[in-house]
Image (spheres, rainbow, N blue to C red):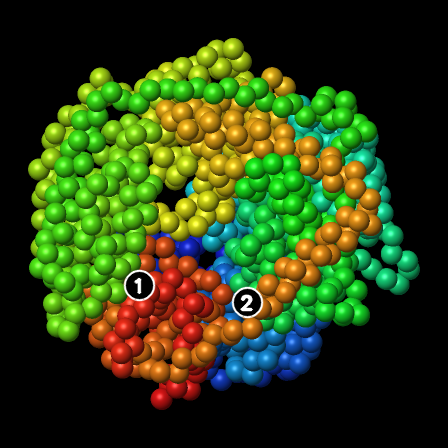
Amino acid sequence: MKITKQFPGVLWGPSGPAARRAGQRRPQRGGSGGEVGRGAAPAAPRLQFRFSLSGCGSPAAPPSARGFGKSLPDPVGFKGSGVRVRLGLAGRPAAVMTAEQRRNLHAFGDYVRKTLDPTHILSYMAPWFRDDMVQYVQAEKNNKGTMEAASLFLRYLLELQEEGWFRGFLDALDQAGYSGLYEAIESWDFQKIEKLEEHRALLRRLQPVFKTRVNPKDILPDISECLIDQECEEIIQVCSNKGLMAGAEKMVECLLRSDKENWPKTLKLALEKEESVFSELWTVEQGAKGVETKDLGDEEIETSEIQIFYKEEPEYQNLSQNSSPPSEVAPLKIRNYQLELALPAKEGKNTIICAPTGCGKTLVSLLICEHHLKKFPQGRKGKVVFFAIHLPLYEQQKSVFSQYFERRGYKVAGISGATSENVVVDQIVENNDIIILTPQILVNSLKDGTIPSLSVFTLMMFDECHNTSKHHPYNMIMFNYLDQKLGGSSDPLPQVVGLTASVGVGDAKNRDEAMEHICKLCASLDASVISTVKDNLQELTEVVYKPEKNFRKVESRTTDGFKCIISQLMRETESLAKSIFDELGAVTPENLSRFQNRDFGTQKYEQWIIAVQKACIVFQLPDKAEESRICKALYLYTSHLRKYNDALIISEHARMKDALDYLKDFFNNVRAAGFDETEQDLTRRFEEKLPELESVSMDPSNENPKLKDLCFILQEEYHLNPETRTILFVKTRALVDALKKWIEENPKLSFLKPGILTGRGKTTNNTGMTLPAQKCALDAFRTNGDNKILIATSVADEGIDIAQCNLVILYEYVGNVIKMIQTRGRGRAKGSKCFLLTSNADVIEKEKMNMYKEKMMNDSILSLQAWDEAIFKEKVCQIQIHEKSIRDSQGKAKPVLDKKNKKLLCRKCKAFACYTADIRVVEECHYTVVGNAFRECFVCRSHPKPKIFGSFEKKAKIYCAREDCSHDWGICVKYKTFEIPVIKIESFVVEDIATRVQTLYAKWRDFNFEKIPFDAAEMSN
């Protein structure tokens, strides 16, 4: 083993930051720092001896917190000099923190905050940091970001009084790989880190280009020396889980914190090695000062979020070139029809802008927003909130507004359901000029008083504003607005602007009813003007390409062996369930035993089976053991019937093979769970039919005629235009997966390399796509020429701008007139086509009815625009007063708090779980159960996706402890210092102890019991 000696300013032997700068790799933590012969025992930790001369104001310290202290003889050349040595971590002497050093660390704290990710060194600081301090730092990073976590870490550090902590901090920096920061603090010379600032500024400016031009996996091996090992692992992880663009963003984030003085040049060499176009923009010699950034031509722009909006309008491409400084930003070049659309809103009127998808309504919203913010006199400021209902649309609009307005000196921020746990809403609103929100965030903030009033805003913009109806979050926000308006409040109200491709007509049968529907929408948004293009229609038609609409009626299978077999299994399962009802006789709830004469493989059957399942869950008998047996059996029978029904729907629209795979997955999951006698019997029945099902599903004669026709359309369109880009709309996520597999396995179509886009909400079958997955899917379709088709559910039919799409196929997919206009609007390019493919003639008739309603809507808008504005305002006001009176009358009856103690029973087997008196509310929205008795009722299994969210660390899933049940009850989390269960109400039945009446609740907010806040002291006792 090599032992190196190190004096202040003098280095003997190949170790420490200087050696690593010379190209030597630091050893991994716990490994050897020297050389060990083959077959030798593991080497002891590398030792570095640091000496301090007596008389220099640094007396020998007592043993350090790590217990490594001991005296050494005088080193060679220093005999008799009074040298005293203290060993710290890795053999280094522990230093006593002087007041001057503490002041220096405080003074240079900004460099530490900008460079250090404290979570990378927390494990090395364990002797000085308590567990709760470590947790607070980790939580600060999760909630607010790395710099905020570094600030908290530094505060804790400077408050430490224990011996040896300063040397421990330096050793931790060295061990983790922060060689630049280590060297700077040792010498209190931060010039090398300061010189990196201009390169950081350039990288920040070029970040949008970097993430679309650079493959992080390609250059990571060459720049890994400039990063911390843990950061390299995180980049690889992000690339794997979220895609290359997210990985590139993570790489930029890490480089911006790098303390290695050579990282700008190393990055340049890595980019040149990979022949990256970005290397031409990365000018190492000049940093960010006076850089000439390359002017990217229209065909080169790949910043996906922006180019989608301005693809058909090359003169607007400068919006997506983020390399020019704010002073050089040119004003928006708006078309005449866009000026026409914006005019009423620019005049300060509450306006609904109704214009075709693809005409650039986002540009119109930017124009209105900028005009609004500029109109305020000196000393006053406007505040704009822009709402987007879907998360992909939220991300898209947040990106556009940020890139446009931040370069003009405005502050832009966004909050969605996916990020709301990590931010303080009122602070975001207060500190920014433009806030992009998903609407439920504001609904919640108004309800809990975080945002006291809508008067904090001066302009509210509602994207896809046709959703402002019933109990939609848009309408909840406007209820608040209208209550303030009609209640005589003196507080100012914000201007309201709505954007939509279609205001719809509701259930209108004629023009008068359609006009009434549109007036109600205007009343909901307090709009006095409907703005459409009238004077510049010719220009609009040159920009917006209305797809050619085609209807394709195809035949279903003439014989369906798969359906025959599955139907027989369903009849057998129904008979088993019916036999239980026959046992019960007159006790059976009304209509529950009517299993006959129902069509398998339909939405109606699914709706009926759900109703039966709910009734079975709350079914009661005097004998509780018998009740548990019967309810559990009925739960299993109805669950299997529902899965069989799903499989028939998949088979009807896709391949029998896909439907069979769906059932195989289901039965595999059944085997992995409780698998009691009832489930074993149902599984045996399925497996007996499995060979026959396999044979039928593999028979080429059973190919689905719909898929033949879909294949023909795709082949024909790609033959005519190999650059065709397609969106295929389907009803369900299961069908998305089935059609993706079909395309990938079809040799005629596999070249399409399909992507998928589905919603995020949880269904009975799966949990949907995560937000990063949605973003990656959209980015891949927009920017990757290989991904020629996107298979999507309704999440893609509103608002998401995909300008390149020139073919839309509606596969058994039809809705109302709004949905028709939105989905047809996805086809943006010239020569776009839209096909409706169905085997149901009624579907075609419904779509034709939608086309008639679209014309009726346009005629109704023209009629309303001809009204005198004062008369229209009066009409709107009358509707508002009438609707408010209805709301007020309905809102008077507030639910009475039920203070009676109740039981929670397992929804599947009716086993007792807990009493409501033992339930506690954690942070207002999570529910746990106190007391040891509840812990006997459930079992824990490791969570497949453990993660930290807010103050919680998700660790395990909890299930009903009955071996023949294993129903999912929720999760087990670490909250602060406590490990607690968090239960979900939909897993239980609530039973009144006195009356024994049982009730189902889908959400905790629907269950109006006395909710006691979680108290840490109670847990401690």
**Image coordinates for residue 963, horizontal then vertical, percent:** 15, 63
405 to the left or right of 823: right
Of the image marks 2 and 1, the number of the one nearer the N terminus = 2
In the depicted structure, whether residue 522 falls above or below residue 752: below
What element does badge 1 sit on?
Answer: helix
216 to the left or right of 917: right
Residue 246 in view in this figure: yes
Q: Real-space Cα distance between discs 2 and 1?
A: 30 Å
Q: Residue tagged by mark 2?
A: 890
**Image coordinates for residue 933, horizontal then vertical, percent:** 24, 80
* Residue 987's disc number: 1
> Which residue lies at the image location 18% right of the left edge and 26% below the top edge?
561
What element does badge 2 sit on?
Answer: helix
Specify the amino acid type for callout 2.
Gln
In the depicted structure, whether residue 386 falls above or below residue 804: below
Q: Quadrant of the C terminus?
A: bottom left
**Image coordinates for residue 319, horizontal then vertical, percent:** 74, 37
**Image coordinates for residue 758, horizontal then vertical, percent:** 45, 41
* Residue 179's disc number: none
Residue 414 lies in quadrant: bottom right
> Which residue lies at the image location 10% right of the left edge and 56% below the top edge?
582
Q: Residues within 10 Å of mark 2 (few under 14, many from 20)?
A: few
Count of marks placed on residues: 2
Which residue is situated farthest in the right direction here? 378
> Which residue lies at the image location 35% right of the left edge and 22% below the top edge?
706
Which residue is situated farthest in the top direction here? 720
Q: Nearer the viewer, residue 735 or 27?
A: 735
Q: Quadrant of the N terminus?
A: bottom left
Q: Residues within 10 Å of mark 1 (few under 14, many from 20)?
A: many
Q: Nearer the viewer, mark 2 or mark 1?
A: 2
